[in-house]
Image (cartoon, rainbow, N blue to C red):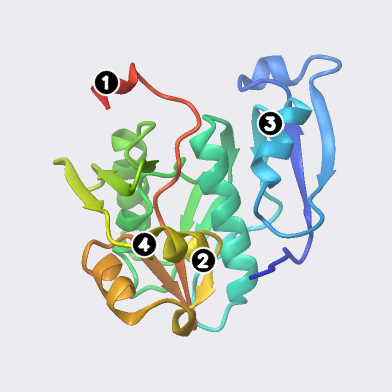
Amino acid sequence: MTTTLTTPTVLAWRDYDPDACALPGMSLGEVPLPGPARGQAERLWKLGARRVRLPAPVDLTDGADPAAALYGLSLVRDLTARAVMVEWELRLDPGAADTWRRLNHLQPPTALHGPDDAEDSLRTWRRGHYLCKCLWRQGPGFIQIRDRRWGELRRFTADEPGYDTAIDRLDYGAPRADVPADVLDEFRSEQLVLEVGTFAWWVPYRVSRWLQQSIAI
């Protein structure tokens, strides 16, 4: 699925630290993001971006544009996988207070809007965040997801044909009807997809930078 932000630009800097970002030559300015979300994080990384600010909140409320939401979520996820500092905001419906838990492997937003307990939820998100909290990897003939979003390690391994194709479709958002129902139901049961409008989106990231030696992950 091809999706675009209403304003397809981000602000970017060459360093994580705010003081360093204020030095001459550290700002990359407004960087346009033409085309689909796939590959944009890699492009920003190659440009030297180590801190990125999204121009508008990722809006997951009912009635919001699902294409823009999926684009923003995908960018945050892919930048988190590269350990890039992401400045973004998240907007949820008041009744969707637990949605943030499904996303707590992502770089915490600077603001969480909507739920009554938004401040407490955001504080918990920030305290519990670390790299590699929910990731997937592809081995020879299998897919494995390692998920610590709920505290303990949950491991999901699939060697049946078709899972890799389903993940590739879901990676940047796909109509639910385009994914085999049995595979989608299994991903739902493990809370590995987020449903936005008529679309489903793949939650784990394929890690680009390890927090520790890979044997410890």
Residue 191's disc number? none
Position of the N terminus, as image quadrant, is bottom right
Instruction: Name the residue at 55% across, 44% down.
Output: 78
Give the SS element for disc 4: helix
- Give whichever of 22, 40 is nearer the camera: 40
Q: Earlier in the sequence, mark 2 or mark 1?
A: 2
Name the amino acid type tagged 1. Ile
Q: Earlier in the sequence, mark 2 or mark 4?
A: 4
Which class describes the residues within 10 Å of circle 2: few (<14), some (14-19), or many (20+)? Answer: some
Name the amino acid type tagged 4. Tyr
Residue under label 1, please give it.
215
Give the SS element for disc 3: helix
The answer to whether marks 4 and 1 mark residues whose Cβ atoms lie closer than 8 Å is: no
Instruction: Name the residue at 55% across, 84% down.
Output: 63
Name the amino acid type tagged 2. Arg
Q: CA distance from mark 2 to mark 1?
A: 29 Å
The answer to whether marks 3 and 2 mark residues whose Cβ atoms lie closer than 8 Å is: no
Query: Horizontal and vertical percent for residue 42?
Result: 67, 38
Residue 45's disc number? 3
Give the SS element for disc 1: helix
Residue 169's disc number? 2
- Give whichever of 26, 70 is nearer the camera: 70
Name the amino acid type tagged 3. Trp
Query: Horizontal and vertical percent for residue 203?
Result: 41, 56
Residue under label 4, please give it.
163
Check the image and name the residue furthest to the left. Answer: 152
Position of the C terminus, as image quadrant, is top left
Q: CA distance from mark 3 to mark 2?
A: 24 Å
Quarter of image, res 189: bottom left
